[in-house]
Amino acid sequence: MSDPLAKRLLAEAVGTALLVGIGTGAIVATSSVVGGRYFLLAVAWFLAVTIPVALFASISGAHLNPVVTLALVADRRLPTSEIAPHVAAQVAGAFLGSATVLAMFGNSHGLGATVPSGGDVPRALLLEFAFTFLLLASVLALVRFGAGRVRWRLTWPGLAVAASTYLIGPWTGSSLNPARTLAPAVLSGVYTDLWVYFVAPPVAALVAVGFVRWWDRRRAREQPK
């Protein structure tokens, strides 16, 4: 990225605030919906990811998630020295987004906090790992293939998060993002099994980088000489 670091960090903070505000706001706003709620939430989270990605991808890369930053460093797309400021900006943005939800709806429904359903921690770990891997695979593919004509590939991360919301939202809350989990937890005081969402996503991100880099080497070997 050629933009100054301060500009990129501001983009990360604002983008993450939008992501958390739209996504967790939708969780609270639809709390009384019975039929089709997770379809509505999948649409909301698709927009929550895709809008800031479309707005800020050309400025900061629109990581919006500490584990995306971690993966890009591991993939040698970003210097190690930028992990801490990026994560700080993302966490600050997440708190801004969650505080906005608190101001709008009050402290209800944990502000969209993520909690393993029924206290089933092993299931939550496995599902958060699997869908964070899917999210990071979409991000790393986007990095390699570019935005595409009319920037349509920018929808890939949003589609991954939408699929996660619909498929595992009832079981884990579908975090895939430590900043998205931390802010509602702190502001609502809901800390149940919080560690799950700080362990599974970064491990999945590093595994995804390892897989994609292995795939890169395999494709390179198969290219005609």
Image: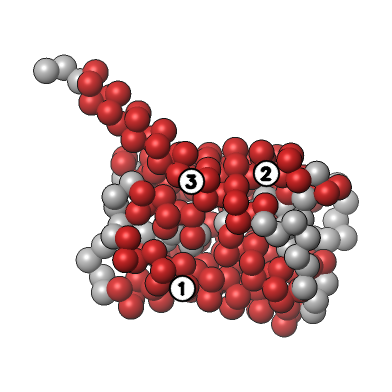
Q: Total number of numbered labels?
A: 3
Q: Considering only order in the chain, which callout, 1 or 2, is on the residue closer to the N terminus?
A: 1
Residue 73: x %, y % from top left: 35, 54
Q: SS class of the residue under badge 1?
A: helix
Report the Cα–Cα distance between label 1 and label 3.
19 Å
Please give left or right for residue 48 compared with residue 209 in the image. Answer: right
Q: If you read the primary sequence from the N terminus, does the residue marked by circle 1 or circle 3 appear first?
A: 1
Q: Mark 3 points at which residue?
A: 205
In the depicted view, which residue is nearer to us: 112 or 122? Answer: 122
Residue 85 appears left or right of 194:
left
Name the residue that disc number 2 marks. 125
Circle 1 crowding by C-alpha within 10 Å: few under 14, some 14–19, many from 20: many
Of badges 1 and 3, the one in the foreground is 3
Check contact, mark 3 vs mark 2: CB within 8 A. Answer: no
Specify which label sits upstream in the sequence, 3 or 2: 2
Identify which residue is drawn at 33% across, 76% down. 7
Q: Is residue 106 above or below residue 179?
A: below
Q: Can residue 27 be seen in this view?
A: no
Task: Give the label on residue 41, or none.
Answer: none
Query: Tag 3: Cα neighbours inside 10 Å, few (<14), some, or many (≥20)?
Result: many
Distance CA(mark 3)–CA(mark 2) = 14 Å
**Where's the N terminus, which quadrant?**
bottom left
